[in-house]
Amino acid sequence: MLLTSQVPGKMFEWIGALTVTMVVCAIVLILAEKIQQWLGERAVTAFERLMGLVLVAISVEMILTGIKTFVYQL
Protein backbone atom coordinates (compact mmCIF):
# COMPACT_ATOMS: atom_id res chain seq x y z
CA MET A 1 0.00 0.00 0.00
CA LEU A 2 2.87 2.35 0.78
CA LEU A 3 4.46 1.75 -2.60
CA THR A 4 1.20 2.22 -4.47
CA SER A 5 0.53 5.48 -2.64
CA GLN A 6 3.94 6.79 -3.73
CA VAL A 7 3.67 5.66 -7.37
CA PRO A 8 -0.03 5.04 -8.15
CA GLY A 9 0.64 4.38 -11.84
CA LYS A 10 2.49 1.15 -11.04
CA MET A 11 -0.19 -0.41 -8.86
CA PHE A 12 -0.61 -3.50 -11.06
CA GLU A 13 3.16 -4.02 -11.15
CA TRP A 14 3.32 -3.92 -7.34
CA ILE A 15 0.39 -6.33 -7.08
CA GLY A 16 2.10 -8.66 -9.56
CA ALA A 17 5.38 -8.53 -7.68
CA LEU A 18 3.62 -9.21 -4.39
CA THR A 19 1.70 -12.12 -5.90
CA VAL A 20 4.86 -13.69 -7.35
CA THR A 21 6.61 -13.30 -4.00
CA MET A 22 3.72 -14.93 -2.16
CA VAL A 23 3.63 -17.85 -4.61
CA VAL A 24 7.39 -18.43 -4.33
CA CYS A 25 7.18 -18.32 -0.52
CA ALA A 26 4.28 -20.77 -0.54
CA ILE A 27 6.17 -23.18 -2.81
CA VAL A 28 9.27 -22.99 -0.62
CA LEU A 29 7.21 -23.63 2.51
CA ILE A 30 5.38 -26.55 0.92
CA LEU A 31 8.63 -28.11 -0.32
CA ALA A 32 10.68 -27.20 2.78
CA GLU A 33 11.17 -30.77 3.93
CA LYS A 34 12.37 -31.95 0.52
CA ILE A 35 14.66 -28.92 0.19
CA GLN A 36 16.10 -29.70 3.62
CA GLN A 37 16.77 -33.31 2.61
CA TRP A 38 18.33 -32.20 -0.69
CA LEU A 39 20.63 -29.64 0.95
CA GLY A 40 21.67 -31.84 3.83
CA GLU A 41 21.98 -31.15 7.52
CA ARG A 42 25.26 -29.22 7.32
CA ALA A 43 23.96 -26.77 4.71
CA VAL A 44 20.73 -26.21 6.64
CA THR A 45 22.74 -25.55 9.82
CA ALA A 46 24.93 -23.10 7.92
CA PHE A 47 21.86 -21.26 6.58
CA GLU A 48 20.34 -21.13 10.07
CA ARG A 49 23.50 -19.59 11.49
CA LEU A 50 23.77 -17.13 8.62
CA MET A 51 20.16 -16.02 9.01
CA GLY A 52 20.69 -15.70 12.78
CA LEU A 53 23.69 -13.47 12.13
CA VAL A 54 21.69 -11.31 9.73
CA LEU A 55 18.87 -11.02 12.29
CA VAL A 56 21.33 -9.99 15.00
CA ALA A 57 22.91 -7.38 12.70
CA ILE A 58 19.50 -5.88 11.89
CA SER A 59 18.48 -5.81 15.56
CA VAL A 60 21.75 -4.17 16.63
CA GLU A 61 21.33 -1.54 13.93
CA MET A 62 17.76 -0.84 15.10
CA ILE A 63 18.85 -0.59 18.74
CA LEU A 64 21.70 1.78 17.90
CA THR A 65 19.38 3.94 15.79
CA GLY A 66 16.90 4.09 18.66
CA ILE A 67 19.61 5.04 21.15
CA LYS A 68 20.94 7.69 18.76
CA THR A 69 17.46 9.17 18.31
CA PHE A 70 16.87 9.13 22.07
CA VAL A 71 20.18 10.87 22.80
CA TYR A 72 19.50 13.59 20.20
CA GLN A 73 16.11 14.28 21.80
CA LEU A 74 17.66 14.92 25.21
Image (cartoon, grey):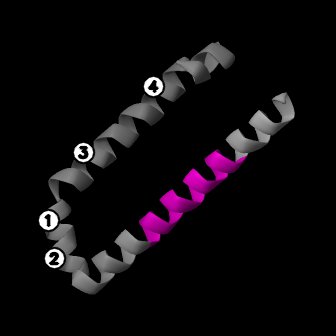
Instruction: Pick out the residue farthest to the front.
Output: 74
Is 38 left or right of 16, judged from the image as shown?
A: left
Q: Are marks 1 and 4 in contact (CB under 8 Å)?
A: no
Give SS at disc 1.
helix
Picture coordinates of residue 66 (x, y %)?
69, 40
Neighbours of disc 3 within 10 Å: few (<14), some (14-19), many (20+):
few
Instruction: Pick out the residue farthest to the bottom.
Output: 42
The question of residue 57 being in magenta is answered with yes
Neighbours of disc 4 within 10 Å: few (<14), some (14-19), many (20+):
few
Report how far apart the C-alphas of labels 2 and 4 lie in the structure. Answer: 33 Å
The numbered mark, 3 or 4, whose residue comes first in the sequence reads 4
Q: Are marks 1 and 3 in contact (CB under 8 Å)?
A: no
- Span of residues in magenta: 50-64
Residue in the picture at 31% in, 78% down: 45
Mark 2 highlights which residue?
37
The question of residue 52 being in magenta is answered with yes
Give SS at disc 2.
helix
Mark 3 highlights which residue?
26
Give SS at disc 4.
helix
- Residue 8 in which image quadrant: top right
